[in-house]
Image: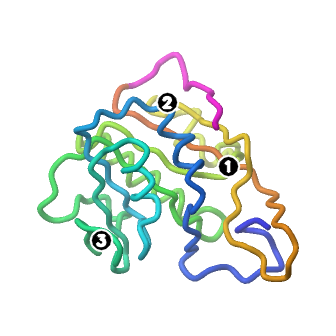
Amino acid sequence: MGKHETGYRRMERDFYPTREAWVTQALTSHLKIAPEAVVWEPAAGRDAVMAHQLRAAAGVTVMCSDVEEVKAWQPSVRHNFIRAELPQGWGKVSGIITNPPFGSRGKMAERFIGAGLKHLERGETAMLALLLPSDFDSAGGRRKFFADCPRFSAKITLTKRITWFQRTDGIRPAPKENHCWCVWTRADRPWGPLLLYGP
């Protein structure tokens, strides 16, 4: 079942942790992340699942934030990412990687993209990677983030479907949604974004 499928009550704050490690590995297998890199996970949730996966897959330092307390990770702070400000006392980070909340009609995800691009423009980070539905870039109103954005660098299409939560009725989960990682970088790519696949 999909996280946006009708007929199921949506989780509060669109809290769908990315529990399957292959999803994060599909991203890190394509990125050249230096071991000394500092990655910011700005929608970590209380369990910081993706932060654990990023550290395991890439061996990097991960700093977490969320609008609620992140109980399972240090360093972490309560912070609203869409304000497009670095948490107080933080310096530059190598990259921002997260599964953003989707929101009604994808508006919250759009706000995450907008905030992340501001961090790129100010030189506070070199890379932004967000986990999004595969057709998220097809909406005409989002061209400014994708087709018309010179910083949009890559789309990593996932060749498996994510299971967001397990069924409790004994039926095997059969997710129906396709997802991808969308990547923006500080360096413009005038020849257009790369199309990649994983895992």
Secondary structure of residue under mark 3:
loop
Report the amino acid beneath label 1.
Answer: His
Image quarter where the N terminus lies is bottom right
Q: Are marks 3 and 1 in contact (CB under 8 Å)?
A: no
Q: Quadrant of residue 166?
A: bottom right
Residue receiving disc 3: 79
Q: Residues within 10 Å of mark 3 (few under 14, many from 20)?
A: some
Residue receiving disc 2: 153
Seen in the picture, residue 52 relative to 122 is either above or below; the reply is below
Seen in the picture, residue 126 relative to 195 is either above or below; the reply is below
Which residue is at the front of the view, 97 or 152? 97
Report the amino acid beneath label 3.
Answer: His
Please provide the residue range marked out in magenta: 188-199
Q: Is residue 101 magenta?
A: no
Q: CA distance from mark 1 to mark 2?
A: 17 Å
Instruction: Count every numbered label the image shows and give the total.
Output: 3
Residue at image position (58%, 73%) is 14
Q: CA distance from mark 2 to mark 3?
A: 27 Å
Q: Position of residue 24 (x, y in %)?
A: 52, 48
Q: Earlier in the sequence, mark 3 or mark 1?
A: 3
Residue receiving disc 1: 179
